[in-house]
Amino acid sequence: MKPTTCLTFCLLLLAGFRDGVKVAFSNVLHFDAGVLYEYEYSTSMTLAPISVDLGDVTTTSLEAVIQIHSLWRNPQDQEEQLLHVKIKDLKFTTDSSDATTKPLAVEELDGGLDYKEAVIVHMNSGKIQGVFDTTEDNTASLNFKKGLVSLLQIQSTYGLITEDDATGRCQVLYHTLKDDIIKVKNYKNCENSITDDVMSSAQILGVSSPGWSEAVFIMDDNHIKSVTSQEFRSVVLEEQSTVGIHVSSRQLLRLLSTKSGANEEAQGELQEVLASFKGSHVNHTIHALPAVRQSALSGYPISKLLDHLKANEMKKSQSRTTEVFLQLSQSLRSMKMNEIKDILKKSDSTLVSVLIDAAAAASTPAALDAVISYIDVADPKKAPLLEKFLYACAFSAQPSQHLISVVNKILSHTSTKRQTREITRIVLGTVIRKMCSANMCLLQEVEDALTLILKGLGSSKDEAEIKSHLLALKSALIPEIVPVLLQYIDQSKPVSIIVLSALQDLPTQYITEEVKQHVRDIFKQNKKSFSAAVRVAAAQILLMHDPLYTDVKEVLLRIAKEKPEISKFLTAKVTSLLQSNHPARDVILTVLKDSKLNNYFHLGRVGCSSSYAGLMAEAKDTVTSYEFEFLFSDTGALKQSNSHFSTQSRGGSLHSLQVSLELGGIDSLLASEPIEEAEQEDLMAGMSAMFLGVQIQPITFFQGYTDLMSKYFTAPDGPMNILSGNILLINQKQSVILQSGLQTQVFFHGGLSVDVSADLDFSLFTQESKSTVNNGFSIVVSARAEAEAPFMSTAVKTKTEMNSSISFVTTVNFSTIPVQYCLQLIREPLLYREKTSTRVSIQNRKKTAHQKRRKWTIPGEETALHRDNSMMCRKLL
């Protein structure tokens, strides 16, 4: 885009929105009777991956001679006309850095544009009212003609105006610059210039489609001397704007000559004139029609994919596995149940897990039923595969009635192991949430699934069963669960923690006064005593969900009354909120106007507990932030830690990972004084995690002293696997209609391979614990665009791969008071690969192609989290 054009564009946008003033031009368009107007017409289109220099790609062009004359004019309104538009000598060329093809007449091409029959255009006051054409079953030809005649549309006022053209109904801005009339359009103000086909309704990545166009009319009195139109469209990944496609096009209409000899204008009323030729001409709107095209993501033979996957398994290439997973999920969508089941039976055991992930990502009834039939839910030996399939269903981007029925069916089998039933409940809750997010909450299958969980909760007596059902409700995260959660909010510590975390995750509008009253009772211990972890969780709900002045003041007042570690945690939490843009910040500042609360003696607390947030990484399109919370006991033992990782982009916020580590009963080993009843706990250590919004079944490292010693001496080497598999991130198609009437379809396809493991090294002899959560991942995202034209094939593709791992290490030494702890957030080197390709072919006669590859490595680093943490790490490590 030229600087002058950009400046003009910006100024015009400002002028167009200024007071919405519309000023009339004098007669801006007129075709005289008995005169044949001959124009030179050309249009070009360029497709390019965003990361490629536009000078290195191929441009396709069409050239023609256009003849226009007036068929009819309204005697009462001289601005209403019927125009006869004929296309002659249509030629096609391609231009690339390699070579320029010799212009080819469209007649030389098989299946070329059906352009010879003239098109009749009905115009009134510069607006196109209809297009009459004889073209049948040739959408590309009709769209091309609509794009051409759209150039004749110029309205008689300037300012912001709604206008219909080939791209849809848009708000356009007319303005003058010297003797030129300029029309500017921002595509975000168009109703149907782009159509979306989101194949995955709950996909994780998003797509945006910015774009603009500018047309410059040079007039000779009230005749069009020339029109130059250019547009620029982008379809990009919101989280990574270097992944996507640029589409640019240009149209030129230039007057060659005027001469007499055209037919004289017909007489009579409009309908009479239309009737004279309407027999073979069909009336169309000016909007271009979407073309039906098969998916550009063509499937590969399953056998070749599996061979490639087996080779990658041997090489341990995670990115290659991700790519094959994406191709498998695409191929399985069109296969029948028996075909998929046969593939599963014949596949090597090392490949079955990827096939299961691919079937869940395809999420067709045939794919889901094939996996269930292959696994055999009633066979306890197949439990690991069944649990893998369940998690794959939880991450499915296509929630459906059949999917929820499949999970219900698994839950109904009493022969499944207890652990499998617990995972099934959690997954069922996740599927309920996704279906409600897709406006399918009122379906009978969803209501039946929720009823099943609620009935199971009501009949549960064992605490483990109650926790499992509550985790399912937490995963569902719908407002109907609030009254049920309140029934369990003041139970044992593990149960209360689940309930409070579920309430914390709910949108603020569902944290009603009734909910807050229950939470206040817990924090202030009005009815009974609660452990420090439960009270701290209650205080956070009061602080972070539409905080009230009275509640914030109560939390700050109690800082002076609480034990040291709770006081320290509350002070750190308030300080962290003050350093953010959270809505609670303003309320806290108001409360702190009271000098009795805002002073060093009140807020200057000593302890190990902490709460702080910060940035982990900042890029052009995304910001990754973290939030850490650590609660210690007064004896110096770590009681609970929560780690949250979120990613913000133009498309919104994604809660990528949450890890909660819980330790209990350590105080009884360290304390020299009796422990209060509310703080007395069994010796235990456990972890709970959520990944991409999906709750993972909590794991227990040990429960009780005997279990600790047993696992200490018999524990296998290496970490415990929490989650491993392949997840579909995006599967989307978008059709972009250009000013010229040509159409481009853009496909996005992306997946994530992830391997999350955890390890806890706990020693009573050295009085030190070290927990490590490692998240290894590989991301592959491709964007592909194809031009819609019957006589040519233009395609571009860009593919991005990223491989790395992130480790979160917590080391705690409680041999001294105060305890020492060190947090480490370590990212291994990130390998980034990018491949782009461009291809153009004309009826298989001429092909041009460009390919580029590049790769680089971003060095690994350890994120600096907090100054106090850095100081302790230097002492401890």
Image: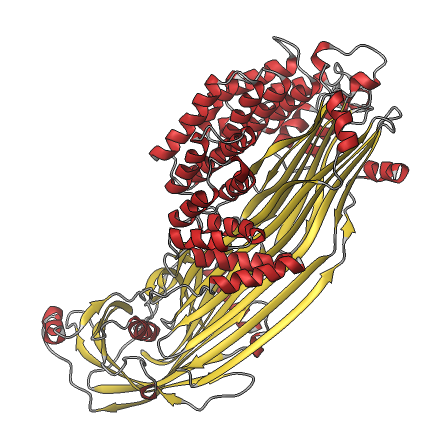
**Displayed quadrant of residue 55:** bottom right
- For the N terminus, the quadrant is bottom right
Nearer the observer, 319 or 191: 319
- Look at the image and tell me whether residue 551 can be seen: yes
In the displayed orientation, state which residue is furthest to the top: 527
Would residue 215 be found to the left or right of residue 660 on screen?
left
Where's residue 753, x and y in %?
Answer: 60, 51
Image coloring type: secondary structure
When the figure is inspected, residue 317 is found, relative to residue 671, above or below; the finding is: below
**Displayed quadrant of residue 578:** top right
When the figure is inspected, residue 582 is found, relative to residue 225, above or below; the finding is: above
Where's residue 577, x and y in %?
Answer: 68, 32
Nearer the observer, 287 or 180: 287
Where's residue 705, x and y in %?
Answer: 76, 21
Would residue 134 be found to the left or right of residue 43 on screen?
left
Please tell me which residue is depicted at 57% across the width and 78% down the height of the picture.
56
Would residue 699 be found to the left or right of residue 154 on screen?
right
- Look at the image and tell me whether residue 11 can be seen: no
**Displayed quadrant of residue 239:** bottom right
Nearer the observer, 147 or 341: 341
- For the C terminus, the quadrant is top right
When the figure is inspected, residue 519 is found, relative to residue 509, above or below; the finding is: above
Number of on-image labels? 0
Would residue 835 be found to the left or right of residue 250 on screen?
right
Where's residue 403, x and y in %?
Answer: 42, 41
